[in-house]
Image (cartoon, rainbow, N blue to C red):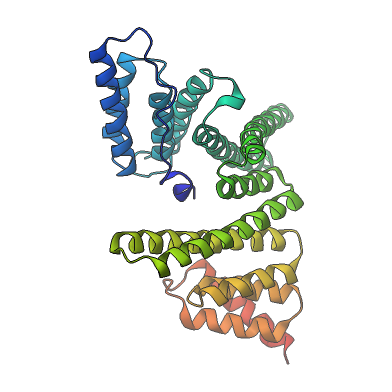
Amino acid sequence: MLARSYCLLLFSTVGCTLFGLSPQERADLAQHQEQAGIYWQANRLPQALDQVRQGLEIAPTDYKMNQIKGYCLLRQANDSRYATTPARRRGLLDDALAAFDATLALRPLEEHAPQMLLGDALLHEELARSVMQDKLQAEAEHQRPDLSAQERALHLVRLQEYELEMRQHLARGERDLEMLLRRGDLLLLAHKHMMNVKALRGDYAGAVEHGQSYLERCRGAQSTQQKLYESTLQVGAEQKAAQELGGLVHDELTVRSQIANLHFDHGRFDLAASELDRILTMDPSRSSDYYNRARALNEAKRFDEAYRDVQKFLATHNLPAGHSSLVRAHELLRRLEELRR
C-alpha cells in the first residue's frame, strides 16, 4: 500500500554528525551512508541495515543513518519476507518508531528534511491502521454472548484504549503532513497520505478534498512526464520518463479507487459510479471494478447499467470457482434480473 510512497526517495546528506570525528571516521561514515542509500534503492534491506549499524557505531546521532534505519524497518514491516507474523510486523513497526523518534529528536520539527516528515507520517498511518485492526477484533470479542459483566467492562476499557491510541497516531501523521503542505514539500505524497489519514479518522469530506488535490497535481505531473517522454532523444531518459509516467497513472487509479470507496461507504453512490467510470475509461481491463461499479449503480437504482456491469465482470474475471466475490456477484445478478422483469 505504501510502496511507491517511499521506494524512490533519496536521502539528504545534510546534517551529518562530523564534530569530534577523525578524518578516517568521517570517510568511513560517508562510505556507510552512501552504501546504505544504494542498498535501500535496490531494496536490499538487510545489507542497508548492516551499513546503518556500522555507521551508527561511528556516529550514533547521525541524521541520515537514523532516517534510513527507520525507512528500512518500515519497509520490512510491509514485506511478508520479514513480517512473517502479526507480532513480528508490529515489532518492526515499533523498531521503526524508535528510529524515527531518535531522528526527530535531533532537530526542531520545522527544520526536519521533507523525507523525514513523510517517513514519520507513513509510519503513524500504518500504526493507526494496525491499531484499528486490533480494535475491530476487540469489538467482535465484545459482542460474544457468553461474556460476564466484568469481562464486558474490561473489553470496553480496551476498546477505549485502542481508540485513543489510534487517534494519537493519526494526530502525529496529520502534524507531519500539515508541515509538508505548509512548506510546499512532497505535495503529491502529502496529499495522498493526508487522504488516507483523514479516511482512517472518519473525516469523509477531508479525505475526498485531499484526494482531489492529489489528482489535480498528479495530472500536472503526468503532463510533465509525457512531454519529457515525447521530447527526449536519449534512451535512458525516455525509459525513466515512461517509468515515472506509468507509476503516476497507477497511483491515480489507486487514489480514484479509494475515493470511489469513500463515496460508496458514505452513500454517495452516483459519485462512486462516476469515479469508477473514469477508472474504467483509463483501464478497461480492471475486471473487479465492473463489479464495484455494478454495486454502486445498483444502490443508485440504475438497474440496467448495473446488470450489464455484473455480466461484464463475470465474463472477464480470473478468480477461482467458488470465490466469495463470484458468489456475491451471482447473487447480485439474480436480484437485478428480478428487478428488471
Q: Is 286 on the left-hand or right-hand side of 164?
A: left
Q: Is 270 on the left-hand or right-hand side of 100?
A: right
- Nearest the viewer among 324 and 100 is 100
The percent coordinates of residue 185 (x first, y second) are 58, 41
Where residue 149 sits, quadrant-wise, is: top right
Which residue is depicted at the point 38% across and 10% down? 19
Where residue 29 sits, quadrant-wise, is: top left
The percent coordinates of residue 239 (x first, y second) are 33, 62
Quadrant of the drawing holding the C terminus: bottom right
The percent coordinates of residue 254 (x first, y second) are 54, 60
Where residue 171 sits, quadrant-wise, is: top right
Callout count = 0
The percent coordinates of residue 323 (x first, y second) are 48, 68
Q: Is 88 on the left-hand or right-hand side of 299?
A: left
- Nearest the viewer among 7 and 156 is 7
Is 231 placed above or below 40 here? below
Which residue is depicted at the point 51% across and 74% down? 283
Is 197 placed above or below 250 here? above
Is 276 placed above or below 254 here? below
